[in-house]
Amino acid sequence: MRKPRQEMIAETRGKLIAAGRRAFGTIGYAEASMDDFTGEAGLTRGALYHHFGDKKGLLQAVIMEIDAEMTERLNEVSAAAPTRWQGFVEECSAYIEMALEPEIRRIMFRDGPAVLGDISQWQNTPGCIAALSRSLDRLKADGEIIDIDTETAARLINGASSHMALWIANAENPEAVSKRAVAGFKAMLGSLRRQE
Amino acid sequence: MRKPRQEMIAETRGKLIAAGRRAFGTIGYAEASMDDFTGEAGLTRGALYHHFGDKKGLLQAVIMEIDAEMTERLNEVSAAAPTRWQGFVEECSAYIEMALEPEIRRIMFRDGPAVLGDISQWQNTPGCIAALSRSLDRLKADGEIIDIDTETAARLINGASSHMALWIANAENPEAVSKRAVAGFKAMLGSLRRQE
DNA sequence: AGATAATGCATACGCTCCGTATGTCAATGA
DNA sequence: TCATTGACATACGGAGCGTATGCATTATCT
């Protein structure tokens, strides 16, 4: 073996994150036993404490990983659209849709904020909000939207969409509710547009 | 003593709810030891399990109590305003301000949803959202706002304001952030108004 | 009114889980 | 090659939760 050392370490970290992510995303943070999911990864709690300090540390690592993926996806979506405004709307819709995925909803919108406090705060603004902010900045520079503080708008959208997602996901008939939610949400977005 | 029976029972329930509310609102649900706060109330976990089934049951009771208080306050605020639109804006502002109170923020916006799932769902729409919905309904009937689904709008406002509150509460300089947040929020509200 | 059933609540027990302290083995570096 | 560091496992103690049980007081029945 050439340089197995660093590889093994990284592999262990990856296994722990993956195992924790699966457990947190399904049964939830509080119900996830560290002994259980480390054991499923062929490890023990010793490795977890060594790498992440404690259970919260692992959750934070999981969140950063998911946040990076979300940022990437949001950027792709907005880049693919023909116009900036359209890209922005698509981006917001994608944000709602992502919040409908059980893993993201559970970890990023439920357990994360509850355990670590406001996720959008404990780091210098995580990627997924920054992505929305950037899109708004570009629109503002183009004069396409009203004069509004972009970070505030991004957080408004973040809060509104996450609640829309919760609403949809917990509804008896998600499709019908989804129509209402997206329609109302787009109405709100439309109001940001400069009207002449 | 006349009819101490029912009174004593109600008093026990009240003590448990009060003790749980204080513990949940300060150190948080997860950190609150049932032995501790029942003991502070001069009771034991036995009483808690008897009345509420488990820790979640008590949290639910606490939430219902707080929700009722919030509803009452929101109704008062909107009733006191000179016009309906003004009352609505005041009501929304009051909602944000309430979400800034540590107890409400912690229990209603952080631990509650995390532990019980979407609070605005597990009952047939709790009071504080219903209050917003009613205000919107009246405005719509008066033709003051655009044609939008009122429940959706209420939930959008709920989500946005709770995130605004989180943002403000966790900021280094809450006053400055509060200005930005409220300004942006009112801009969003203003967009609901029918423009002619 | 006395006996019995039921209820409100406390006590006792076992279990799971977490955090830390300790141990062990492999890899690195002089 | 030997000492040291780091990665990870094992071992132990404690806390918290849920349930089963016990006890006292009140309600119900005849």
Image (tube, coloured by chain):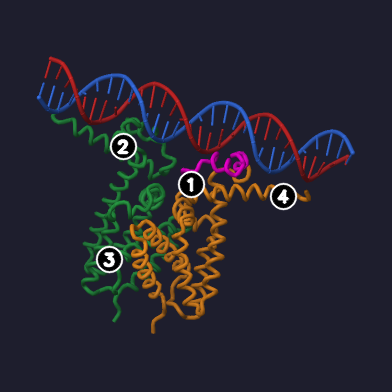
Chain colours: A green, B orange, C blue, D red
Q: Which residue is mark 4?
A: B6
Where in the figure is residue D22, as x and y percent of width and height? 69, 29
Q: Which residue is mark 2?
A: A16
* Disc number lying in front (1 or 2): 1
Respond whether the residues carrying marks 1 and 2 are from the same subunit.
no
Q: Main secondary structure of the magenta part?
A: helix
Q: Which residue is mark 3?
A: A88
Give the numbered dot on residue B29: 1
Q: First in sequence, mark 2 or 3: give its number.
A: 2
Residue C12 to residue D17: above or below: above
What is the CA distance from the residue labelled 4 to the residue labelled 2?
53 Å
Using the image, name the chain to which the residue with label 2 belongs: A
Q: Nearer the viewer, residue B135 or B161?
A: B161
Label 1: state its secondary structure.
Answer: loop
The crowd level at tag 3 (other Cα within 10 Å; few <14, some 14-19, many 20+) is many
Respond whether the residues carrying marks 3 and 4 are from the same subunit.
no
Q: Disc 3 marks which amino acid?
A: Phe
Respond whether the residues carrying marks 4 and 2 are from the same subunit.
no
What is the CA distance from the residue labelled 1 to the residue labelled 2?
27 Å
Q: Which residues are drawn in magenta?
A: B30-49
Residue at image coords 32%, 35%: A48
